[in-house]
Amino acid sequence: MTLTFATAAAALLLAGAATAQDAGGPPPPPPPTPGTTITQTDWRTVAPENLLVIDTSKGRVLVELTPEIAPLHVERVRLLARNGFFDGLLWHRVIDWFMAQTGDPLGS
């Protein structure tokens, strides 16, 4: 009986949390396609401490870090970049306008 009550209570709490995440409002605009022209008004100034510059054999990638959303993750990425962790690593997966994945090939 106690287990059933605990399970039901947990399900109700999780259902409430899931619906609370829906902020409503207009959906975000779709990401630009390769043929889309980006105008000057589409750009904004990024604070230098929140800009990660990645130079690859295919060109330069600019990444805006968002410490207000993920402060611990941003600090870890900054530390790894300052220490040269990413130098020479391969990128495993890149999805335009979404994410780029790299990592330690030795798993250490």
Image: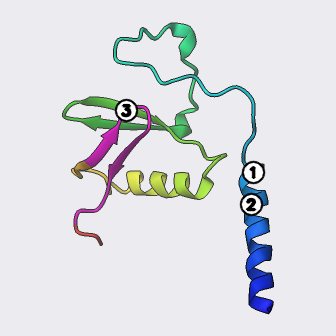
Q: Quadrant of the N terminus?
A: bottom right
From mark 1 to mark 3, how far is it between C-alphas?
29 Å
Estimate the x, y position of residue 98 in percent, counting from the top left: 44, 38
Q: Residues within 10 Å of mark 1 (few under 14, many from 20)?
A: few
Question: Closer to the observer: label 1 or label 3?
Answer: 1
From mark 3 to mark 2, how far is it between C-alphas?
32 Å
Q: Quadrant of the C terminus?
A: bottom left
Estimate the x, y position of residue 12 in percent, counting from the top left: 79, 67
User: Toward which corner of the image does residue 35 lie, by quadrant?
Assistant: top left
Residue drawn at (49%, 58%) of the image? 76
Residue drawn at (31%, 58%) of the image? 103
**Helix, strand or loop for disc 2:** helix
Q: How is the image coloured?
A: rainbow
Which stretch did the figure color magenta?
Answer: 92-105
Q: Amino acid at mark 3?
A: Asp
Circle 3 is placed at which residue position? Answer: 96
The reply to whether the magenta stretch includes residue 98 is yes
Horizontal arrangement in the rendering, residue 68 relative to residue 82 (left or right): right
Estimate the x, y position of residue 51 in percent, counting from the top left: 49, 36
42 or 98: nearer the viewer:
98
Circle 1 is placed at which residue position? Answer: 19
From mark 2 to mark 1, how far is it between C-alphas?
6 Å
* Mark with earlier residue (3, 2): 2
Asked if labels 1 and 2 touch by Cβ distance under 8 angstroms, the answer is yes
Circle 2 is placed at which residue position? Answer: 15
